[in-house]
Image (cartoon, grey):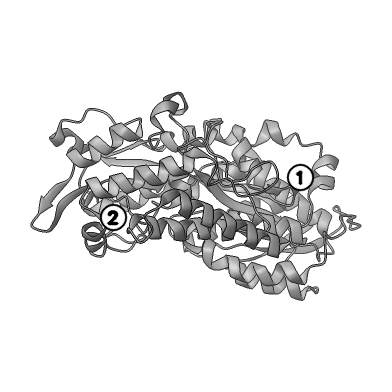
Amino acid sequence: MSGISKNAAIALAATASLALLATACTGQAETTASDDPNAKTTITFWHGWSAPTEAKAIQANVDRFEKEHPNITVKVVGNINDDKLNQALRAGGSKGPDVVSSFTTSNIGKFCSSGAFLDLKPFIEKSKLDLDKIIPKPMLDYTQFEGTRCALPLLGDAYGLYYNMDAFEKAGITSPPKTWSEFAKVAKKLTKTKGDSYSQLGFMPNYHGYETVVDHYMSQWDHTYFDADGKSNIAQDPAFAEMFTYQKSLVDSLGGFGKLEKYRNTFGDEWGAKHPFQTGQVAMQLDGEWRLGMARDAGTDFEIGTAPMPVADDEVDEYGKGFLSGTIIGIAPQSEKQNAAWELVKYLTTDTEAVVSFANAIHNVPSTFAALKSPDLKVDEGFQTFLDIARNPESNTPPASINGSTYQTTLQDFGYQYESGKVTDLQKGLEKTAKQIDTDIAQAK
């Protein structure tokens, strides 16, 4: 995805709409496609990109596909969010899409379990694709649910650390921190107060600080959201308590929740030129690979450094990992042209030229090993960091759930309560939150 239409910004909003779809479907659709993929036909592809450069890049790939498959014409429809997609899949009919995509990786559990996206296993087996050798494991993980693969990844997002190299030099800091304890020291050293506010903040740790959300922090600790029985593990796994304790101590050491929130309210829009990292208001930022291009387009007047986010102090051997997400693509179960639709899905997700050209055009991370290594991939200075994070076997994303991102929202809400001091007993708070997560999942089944 592009930074302009970033999936994290819409994931939670999409969750509610998918609840309707999950109840509307009565099970996984049949996957016995009968259409002739060599027959002359027209299929419809719905995607969510809306910026002119993004739409142009999609169309360029479709044009290449049509040249290789002259019998298949693709009607492309852009700017489709999950609400519109949900309505079309519920309605069915010949006017609906054949190939569908979504920016909301956290809804894969709903898409797969409800039958909203078709099971791709028969198509993958027929095409003899060894996905383990084609696509990095974290990306394979977030496109399946409980053994059902109903999607494939179409480019990805990798999250890392951006830092102001000029500010580092002025502070005498020679390299980005690799552990969270080092990070706390660096963040404090980079912080300059001005009256009751700041002239420069080392890092905005608050959970409302754009990408500094709970699941992005948790990716840098070894953790397990659910136990073997599918029950929430957040109160038992010490990694969660460690993360919440660390984040709260970082908030306190940088001035306290109230002071930080007041400063945060002076920040510009996350997707605009006045983003606080780009203006120099913060010296370090947790963000995705798209920020590099956006900062340069905004005319940022300092040197930008990129690195993986730090890891837990006792997990330094895993430094280099990060949070991953991305666009998912699949086939509508109501499509009467599933074989032809599969040809497009397979091309867009596994053809190296297609993946590389699209990644180059919208500055996202390629979603295949071959594309990540391709000499045709444009690797600007600083971008290699995110390619390495995407390839790192320890990189991760939250596991899929039958009710989408609801459990993440519940945990995030607890984070707001804890960092602000409204909840003071961390363990009891985690136990209460775990019970709520389990209740929500049970009700969704």
Compare marks 1 and 2 and give the one earlier in the sequence: 1
Taking depth in this image into account, of 217 and 77 the one nearest to the observer is: 217
Measured as percent of width and height from the top left, residue 78 is found at: 59, 66
Circle 1 Cα neighbour tier, 10 Å, few/some/many (<14 / 14–19 / ≥20): few
Q: Please name the residue that numbered disc 1 is placed on.
A: 147
Against 214, is 98 above or below? Answer: below
Q: Bin the neighbour count of mark 2 within 10 Å (Cα to Cα): few under 14, some 14-19, many 20 and up.
A: some
Q: Secondary structure at mark 1?
A: loop
Which disc is residue 298 wearing?
A: 2
Taking the spot 40% from the left edge, 35% from the top edge, the residue there is 308
Q: Tell which of 216 and 430 is nearer to you.
A: 430
Residue at screen point 69% across, 30% down: 133
Secondary structure, mark 2, is loop
Is residue 403 in view from this perspective?
no
Foreground residue, 221 or 292?
221
Q: Nearer the viewer, residue 185 or 40?
A: 185
Q: In the drawing, does residue 181 fall left or right of residue 404?
A: left
Name the residue type under label 2: Ala
Residue 167 visible, this orientation: yes
Quadrant assignment, res 442? bottom right
Seen in the picture, residue 380 relative to 428 is either above or below; the reply is above
Amino acid on which disc 1 is placed = Gly
Instruction: Name the quarter where the C terminus is drawn.
Output: bottom right
Q: Quadrant of residue 128?
A: top right
